Image (cartoon, rainbow, N blue to C red):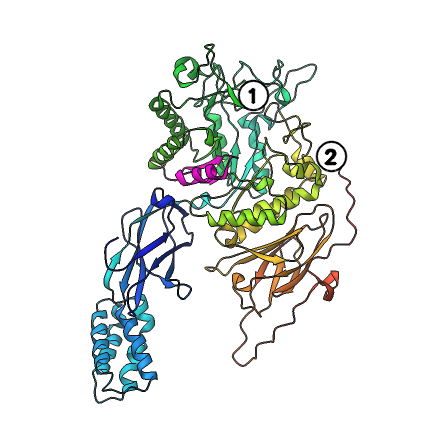
Amino acid sequence: MTGRFPIEDVSPVVACGRYPAKAVVGEVVPVSARAYREGHDALGCNVVWLGPDGAARPFTRMSPGEPGQDRWHATITPDAVGEWRFTVEAFQDPYLTWQNAVTKKLAAGQGPAELANDLAEGARVLTAALDLVPRADRDRVRAAARALTDDAESLPRRVSAALDLADLLWEHPVRELVTTGDERVLWVDRPRALFSAWYEFFPRSEGAIPATVDAPARSGTFTTALDRLPGVAAMGFDVLYLPPIHPIGRVNRKGRNNALTAGPDDVGSPWAIGADEGGHDAIHPDLGTPADFRDFVAAAAEQGLEVAMDLALQCAPDHPWVTEHPEWFTTRADGSIAYAENPPKKYQDIYPLNFDNDPEGIRAEVLRVVLHWVGEGVKIFRVDNPHTKPFDFWHWLIAEVKGVDPDVLFLAEAFTRPAIMHGLGKIGFTQSYTYFTWRTTAAEMRRYCEELVASADWMRPNFWPNTPDILHSSLQHGGPPMFKIRAVLASLLSPSWGMYAGFELFEHVARPGAEEYLDNEKYELRPRDFDGALARGRSLAPFITTLNRVRNENPALHQLRNLRFHDIDNPALLCWSKHDPQTGNTVLVVCSFDSRAVQWGNTTLDMPALGFDWHERFTVRDELTGAEYDWGQRNAVRLDPYLQPAHVLTVRRPAPPAADEPAHPAAPDLTVEDVPAELSGGTAPTAPAEKDDARWTS
């Protein structure tokens, strides 16, 4: 910092400026700082920011925050991908100093003689402002300066024109004693880095034919998987994530349900990467050729789907790296190569890399592999277990890849300690898996989401209700309504969410004693009859489609920083909103956490967070049912898990009254006791619908 005035506690700053803060193109990014000065003269602050092209954007004036705290606030909206730089400046504002003094002296009854110096000072400041304001306003400023020195006019006439310039000179201030703070960095990604909807499927299961007594199993291919693309796109997803598509090792291959011994028809885990056919830059021959993969990526793009690949830096025992670079692995005392372990779990089919042995060689090879797939049209990577590799490696790799193509995104699959998950976000990972799956009460979810909002400068969450490895007990035992509940929470709390195939079919049977699926698709082919389930009304796909439509149509849901929670008097319910001040769009959600019983509650809404005054009323439209309601600060809701476990409400803002029409008085607030069920936010019957889904029987 250079200059006269202290500038402290600038935000956004990550790790004291060691790493860039994060934003996306078009995101409203809050900037704040603490700045103050000696004495009583007025201080002003502004943000100077430079785009990736090095060109300066018009500086943004900062507004003072809570009185007495010396905190200044502004927002900036970057419009290009790349590295942005911003600086907070503090300055002496002579116009504000003059305005404050003159206003107080006039109120005290002082006359022209007592204000002579003030009038002269005002003329000086306005003269200095002539070169700063737009040309169209210069005659107005010049006339105001002349009026201040016109002894023939009354005092009110002399000062009124100058006082009327407050708005103009706020936007184009005279700045003296300018102090420049330290430069800060902001990395800006494309919008999909913040707002995305992911769908995961195994291409080998799409079009697969299971083994019979007469014929062996036949894997699906990239060509047969094309048939699934329209269904995924129709549900509103925009990222299609594929588990590893590389050759699978034969040595120590796992059998079904993670059995230590594989049968002749067992296909093995895709995460046991590498065999005679190649390694991380190769495609499993059962899936097709590189040309087939390129055709698959192109066909997905035509459906509005961007393909994301898995980046798992581990090897099967027969991966080419094992023989070509044995120094890249850990050798045990008996001379064998150490396989992966997470005691008591053992992964005999996987060798982890040892980044302490030949780190430069490993770095060069991994960079080559990633850029190979970038060249094949892949711009999103879901990184498997990044917390088990050195952090400086990821910091280096992500920077190198973005230096080649800044549009590449990285999702960290790291279910580990909070500091590590946050650290991965700070060093460059675009998005992160989260603890969403294990937050199963309204209070837990609220606390966790508030933590994520506070971390929005470096960590972007991606909420998944299920993965091939994770089938939480809430889905195992919560019935079909819990699938709806978890989908609402995942898709409308976080701007990015994802689900693994089978969720829409209510797959819920776990391997005994484990939090994962029975007959896990990691170890076998799992063709599914998605269309048949949809035709029989046994699919959640229409509900998922509605949620993704609501997400796409409402800009407020594209953001994380605007998530606000509202009080509700039932601990089984969670109420939250997202408001976009740029468009005025507001979405308000009330969701039950109870998949078995009807729940009532009364809201106490934070009206300013919705863009309203405390007394106002407004119309809401439930996007799940089409019903409309009149709401205010307090509202009664009724949620039935079998018919409607959540209200997803878009806010309709009332038109302002005509000039000759008086505004209507606010309606009284209502509570549960005042409102019959058929008129409240929910209209479900008191008795739950029967569960007739035969597939729900384990």
Percent across and percent down for residue 462 are 52, 41
Disc 2 marks a residue whose amino acid type is Arg
- Taking the spot 24% from the left edge, 76% from the top edge, the residue there is 122
Q: Which label lies toward us, 1 or 2?
A: 1
- Can you say whether 10 is above or below 219 in the image? below
- Taking the spot 57% from the left edge, 23% from the top edge, the residue there is 345
Marks 1/2 in contact by CB < 8 Å: the verdict is no
- Can you say whether 18 is above or below 574 in the image? above
Judge by depth and name the residue closer to the eye, 560 or 379.
560
Percent across and percent down for residue 100 are 32, 75
Quadrant where the C terminus is found in the figure: top right
Judge by depth and name the residue closer to the eye, 514 or 476.
514
State the extent of the magenta-drawn residues as a range.
Answer: 405-432
Residue 426 colored in magenta in the image: yes
Question: Mark 2 packing: few (<14 Cα in 10 Å), some, or many (20+)?
Answer: few
Percent across and percent down for residue 136 are 27, 71
Percent across and percent down for residue 409 are 43, 38
Q: Is residue 10 left or right of residue 518?
A: left
Q: Is residue 493 left or right of residue 130?
A: right
Disc 1 marks a residue whose amino acid type is Lys
Q: Which mark is residue 346?
A: 1
- Reading the image, the residue beneath label 2 is 695
Q: Quadrant of residue 576?
A: bottom right
Residue 549 showing in the rendered view:
no
Q: Is residue 683 left or right of residue 187?
A: right
Task: Classify mark 2: helix, strand or loop.
Answer: helix
Question: Mark 1 packing: few (<14 Cα in 10 Å), some, or many (20+)?
Answer: few
- Taking the spot 25% from the left edge, 79% from the top edge, the residue there is 144
